[in-house]
Image: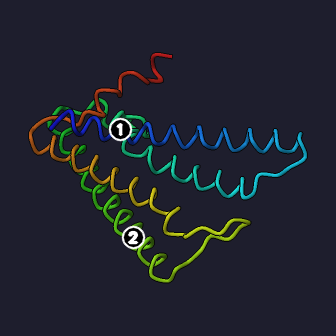
Amino acid sequence: MHSYKDRLYLASGYLSGLCIIIIMVVVLAQIIGRLLGFIVPSAEDISGYCLSASIFFGLAYTFRDGGHIRVTLLFQNLPPKARFAQEFFVLIIGLVLASFVCWYSWYMIWESYLFEELTQGYIPMPLWAVQIPVGLGSTGLLLAVLDALAAMLGGKLPIYTQHEGEVNLEEI
């Protein structure tokens, strides 16, 4: 099971990177198109959708890898039991927020599907289709927070805390 979760987080990171590559290809095609006298329709729209997808797909991977900004100044010198309680409290708050974002992301997608909304732009697309990465990414974040909370309930610190020592401003 552990390797399955790691593969899920890694796939999320790869999808995020793929979206950045798509943005690069679209912008490059737009530049070459301008030089050759043609336009790429909805290039800005596609780039914007891929940027949003990249952000949301990257949430779970970044959370698991310890890449989100954490202010450890207040609790880096706490005793282990106090640190454990603090991490648990923060994860409960994170779980509530991630659940809220996940629920309303999927609700937004469902409403867009029901009302048959289309994107505005040169090439109209179903809005729900470009919103799906938001729902998938927020679901991935929710699963990552649940995974960290399960580790805490098992008596261990979450895996993202292992990366705190790698970026320490006192060492610079």
Residue closer to the observer: 158 or 144: 144
Q: Can the viewer see residue 70?
A: no
In the image, 113: left or right of 29?
Answer: left
Instruction: Return the x and y of residue 46 as percentages of the image width and height.
Output: 64, 54
Number of labels in the image equals: 2
Of the image marks 2 and 1, the number of the one nearer the N terminus = 1
Q: Residue at x 65, y 51 (%)?
A: 47
- Crowding around mark 2 (Cα neighbors within 10 Å: few <14, some 14 to 19, many 20+) is some
Instruction: Return the x and y of residue 32 as percentages of the image width and height.
Output: 82, 38
Residue closer to the observer: 134 or 151: 134
User: Could you say whether the residue bearing mark 2 is in a helix, strand or loop?
Assistant: helix
Quadrant of res 77:
top left
In the image, 21: left or right of 92?
Answer: right
Quadrant of res 65:
top left
User: Could you say whether the residue bearing mark 1 is in a helix, strand or loop?
Assistant: loop
Q: Residue at x 27, y 51 (%)?
A: 143
Q: Mark 2 points at which residue?
A: 104
Instruction: Return the x and y of residue 31 as percentages of the image width and height.
Output: 81, 40
Q: Residue at x 73, y 42 (%)?
A: 27
Instruction: Return the x and y of residue 132 as percentages of the image width and height.
Output: 45, 61
Q: Farthest residue to the bottom: give it.
A: 115
Q: Which amino acid does label 1 sit on?
A: Leu
Q: Which amino acid does label 2 sit on?
A: Tyr
Q: Residue at x 46, y 76 (%)?
A: 113
Q: Name the residue under label 1.
A: 74
Q: How far apart are marks 2 and 1 (CA)?
A: 32 Å
Q: Which of marks 2 and 1 is in front?
A: 2
